[in-house]
Image (cartoon, rainbow, N blue to C red):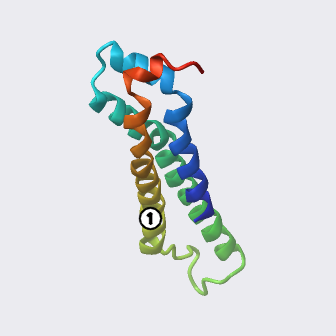
Amino acid sequence: MLACAGLFVLQAEAPVSRRRSLAALVAAGTPRGVLVRATLLAPLAPRVPMVVVAAAVAAGVAAGFATAAGMDEGSRVAAVPWLDLSVLVLGSVALVVVTTLLSLVTLRAATRPEELRVAA
């Protein structure tokens, strides 16, 4: 939860810190929908594969330790709780999406052409 709060602060601050370049894009004719999609895609592109790979590696390591420790009596392959793992992965991705959507509130204010006239 703390990581999501940090991500929210980072995502809410990003359009404000790039307000001049975003305002210049809007003034040049870039549709706001394109900026919204880019703002949504920027945090999701690296984080979704990262969460999936981290969960897969964690499941593999946990299964390896369980097998090596003999916790899986009679069987050589440890059981992986795929449902719990998928809920964890989907929950993590959903929290990233929610924090990114909440940060879009600052995008409209940061893309006003009047921001180009404000001294930085």
Q: Secondary structure at mark 1?
A: helix
| In the image: residue 118, left or right of residue 65 | left
What's the amino acid at mark 1? Gly
- Up the image or down, 66 lies above or below 26; here it is below
- Report the quarter where the C terminus lies: top right
Is 74 or 47 nearer to us in this picture? 47
Is 119 or 61 nearer to us in this picture? 119
Please give the name of the residue rendered at 47% of the width and 61% of the height, measured from the top-left corner.
89
Please give the name of the residue rendered at 29% of the width and 15% of the height, measured from the top-left corner.
29
User: How far from the left and from the top, in percent, is residue 94?
Assistant: 41, 59
Please give the name of the residue rendered at 56% of the width and 80% of the height, measured from the top-left corner.
75
Q: Is residue 57 visible?
A: no
| In the image: residue 43, left or right of residue 74 | left
User: How far from the left and from the top, in percent, is residue 18?
Assistant: 53, 27
User: How far from the left and from the top, in percent, is residue 10?
Assistant: 58, 44
The residue beneath circle 1 is 91
| In the image: residue 17, left or right of residue 84 | right
